[in-house]
Amino acid sequence: MRIAISGSHSLGKSTVVNDWVASRAGYTREEEPYRALGLHGPYEILFRDASTRLHNGIQLYYNISRVHRYASTCRQMTALQAHKEIDTRGLNCPLPILKAKKALADMSSGEVLKVLATDTGSLRDFQAFARQTGNELVQQDTVGAEFVHYLRRR
């Protein structure tokens, strides 16, 4: 998930962003300078000289509301605990799927399997695997060149 807070400098924006990012592992801060929400809707983009303190205040309020909207989802995602973890890094299709299938067979219904992978096709492969087997694909994350898949046993 990506939440963007952008715009020219305004009081409070950097502090809110820095504090929020510092308190949540896995999030990084990116800069997108000189963009502002306009008074006539959320899609008006004003650049540098046209961006006013009022625009920045509106943008800050809008972006903070997005952070609060997704806060419960973030807490659920970070609270996800795997009952079993397998490392398929360095293996290519179909080995990550086969190892996951074998691991799930030894698990009880409702338990969560965490699969670490480096195969770029694994994102698509695990989505198809979940659809075909009835296991729930709870979450997929990309961390650098690695992929993390969470499957809940049916």
Image (spheres, helix red, strand yellow):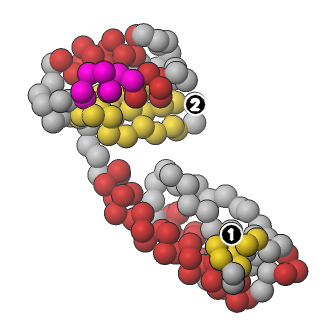
Q: Is residue 61 above or below residue 73?
A: below
Please tell me which residue is depicted at 50% across the width and 52% down the height of the picture.
Answer: 1
Residue 92 location (% of width, % of height): 49, 12
**Which residue, given by chain and number where applicable, does mark 1 sit on?**
43
* Left-right relation of 18 to 114: right
Q: For label 2, count other residues whose C-alpha is less than 10 Å away and answer few (under 14), some (14-19) or many (20+).
A: few
Residue 57 location (% of width, % of height): 64, 85
* Left-right relation of 80 to 53: left
Let me know if residue 130 is in the magenta part.
yes
Please tell me which residue is depicted at 55% across the width and 23% down the height of the picture.
Answer: 120
Q: Residue furthest right?
A: 49
CB atoms of marks 1 and 2 within 8 Å: no
Amino acid, disc 1: Tyr
Considering depth in this image, is 7 or 23 the residue closer to the camera? 7
Q: Is residue 67 above or below residue 95?
A: below
Residue 105 location (% of width, % of height): 18, 17
Give the main secondary structure of the magenta stretch: helix
Q: For label 1, count other residues whose C-alpha is less than 10 Å away and answer few (under 14), some (14-19) or many (20+).
A: few
Mark 1 or 2: in front is: 1
Give the tally of numbered discs.
2
**Which residue, given by chain and number where applicable, does mark 2 sit on?**
145
Please tell me which residue is depicted at 52% across the width and 38% down the height of the picture.
Answer: 143
Asked if residue 145 can be seen in this view, the reply is yes
Considering depth in this image, is 130 or 27 the residue closer to the camera? 130
Q: Is residue 90 above or below residue 147?
A: above
> Which region shows up in magenta?
128-135
